[in-house]
Amino acid sequence: MLHDPIMSAQKIQVAVIGGGLVGLSTALCIIECLPQCSVTVISEEFSPNTTGDVAAGCLIPHVYPDTPLHQQKAWFKETFNYLFKIANSSEASEAGIYLISGWQIFKSAPKEVYPFWSETVLGFRIMDETELAKFQSYKFGQAFTTLKCQASQYLPWMEKRFKSKGGYVEKRKVIDVWDLHGTYDVVVNCSGLGSRDLFGDQSIYPVQGQVLEVNAPWIKHFIRDGDGSTYIYPGISYVTLGGTRKKDDWSCLPNAQTSKVILERCCHLEPSLYGAPVIQEKAGLRPTRSALRIVKDVLVKNGQQLPVIHNYGHGGGGFSIHWGTANEATKLLQQLIPFIHHFKLVSKL
Ligand SMILES: Cc1cc2nc3c(=O)[nH]c(=O)nc-3n(C[C@H](O)[C@H](O)[C@H](O)COP(=O)(O)OP(=O)(O)OC[C@H]3O[C@@H](n4cnc5c(N)ncnc54)[C@H](O)[C@@H]3O)c2cc1C
Ligand SMILES: O=C(O)CCC(=O)C(=O)O
């Protein structure tokens, strides 16, 4: 849909920077909750070239050390409940959302036998000895059912839904956020690692991750080493094997030697994977910070003001909390609306 400035002149003009998982979900949430807003997603890249397109997409929280745990818990629950409804609807197949059961296993019992998310996933229980016997050298395990998003379907599904509600998308890089001033009343920053250059945030850094997609349709359960190093996640048409976590590595090129190591580790967990044909190798950059940044701010330059909502820093856990953080950013935008109306009036005088 083309942007019609006359039709949307009365509305609050919102620019969402970033068309990855976080940008699309935030834009969709805003357009669904705040009908007084006209929303445009501006992004250098969209699916299939975003971080989410590399991810396994499993709902299993990653902990952000400097974000209060009660918030992380609430965002995970909101995301789980939202996706669970989609998984139980006729949209499930197009959206690529489904339930998945499996095991998280440990070489010795972890400090937290019942993690904070254990009440949200379905049927969480400690594995018994018979089940654990499948995994030599693992002494403790958790079995549960969670959800998984197939990014190659979920991201385009969100974009389609957003456009069907009147949202606009533009593929371009924003060089200076002030270039949006005048056309847009408020900017929502979901640019992930782009926040380094765009907003001068030096505390966000990449944690590079590599995965393999293999053809192994007999694998029906996920298996995750509790230390997060190795995982096997069956998807709709392939099984994702991972992983690696390389801090400050900016390369998105998969490395052949790393693939070999990942495959060896996964075969150790699930020997039936020996010989499974590799379909694809991928690497992506987790936009990482010690705390998520979800705040409102007002930039000031030469007497001009530009309200900004930030929503970034989802690291290795974006799928697990994205709908909760989209709701949070939408609430912050709602709080700004009276001020934005005021700015609009003042600038017309
Ligand atoms: C190997 C791997 C496995 C993972 N597995 C899981 C998992 O199983 N479960 C889970 O919960 N999470 C997982 N994740 C994490 C998850 O993928 C990320 O948290 C999430 O995708 C981050 O989304 P984002 O939208 O913030 O970032 P991105 O997808 O990086 O999006 C940022 C967007 O901003 C755009 N942009 C940046 N700067 C500018 C600019 N100046 N102008 C215009 N556009 C700009 C970019 O083009 C991009 O589209 C995994 C990640 C990796 C790498
Ligand atoms: O950690 C996992 O089990 C899922 C994959 C993931 O989140 C990651 O590699 O960042």
Image (cartoon, helix red, strand yellow):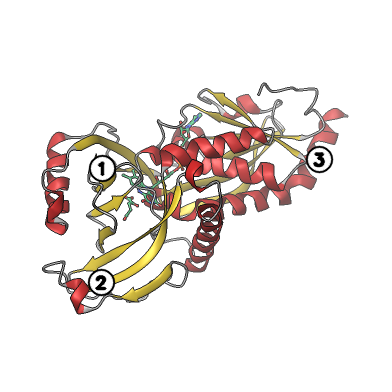
- Of residue 202 and residue 241, the one placed in the foreground of this image is 241
Q: Residues within 10 Å of mark 1 (few under 14, many from 20)?
A: many
Image quarter where the C terminus lies is top right
Distance between mark 3 and mark 1 Cα atoms: 47 Å
Q: Residues within 10 Å of mark 3 (few under 14, many from 20)?
A: some
Q: Position of residue 264 (x, y in %)?
A: 11, 49
Q: Position of residue 261 (x, y in %)?
A: 13, 46
| Quadrant of the image occupied by residue 139 | bottom left
User: Foreground mark, 3 or 2?
Assistant: 2
State the residue lying farthest toward the right.
349
Distance between mark 3 and mark 2 Cα atoms: 54 Å
Q: Position of residue 79 (x, y in %)?
A: 52, 57
In what element is the residue under mark 3? helix
- Residue 341's label in the rendered image is 3
- What residue lies at 73% left-to-right and 45% top-to-bottom? 34
- Residue 211's label in the rendered image is 1
- What residue lies at 69% left-to-right and 30% top-to-bottom? 184
- What residue lies at 61% left-to-right and 24% top-to-bottom? 179
Residue 169 seen: yes
Q: Are marks 1 and 2 in contact (CB under 8 Å)?
A: no
- Residue type, numbered disc 1: Val
In what element is the residue under mark 2? strand
Image quarter where the N terminus lies is top right
- Residue 141's label in the rendered image is 2
CB of mark 1 near ligand 1 (< 8 Å): yes
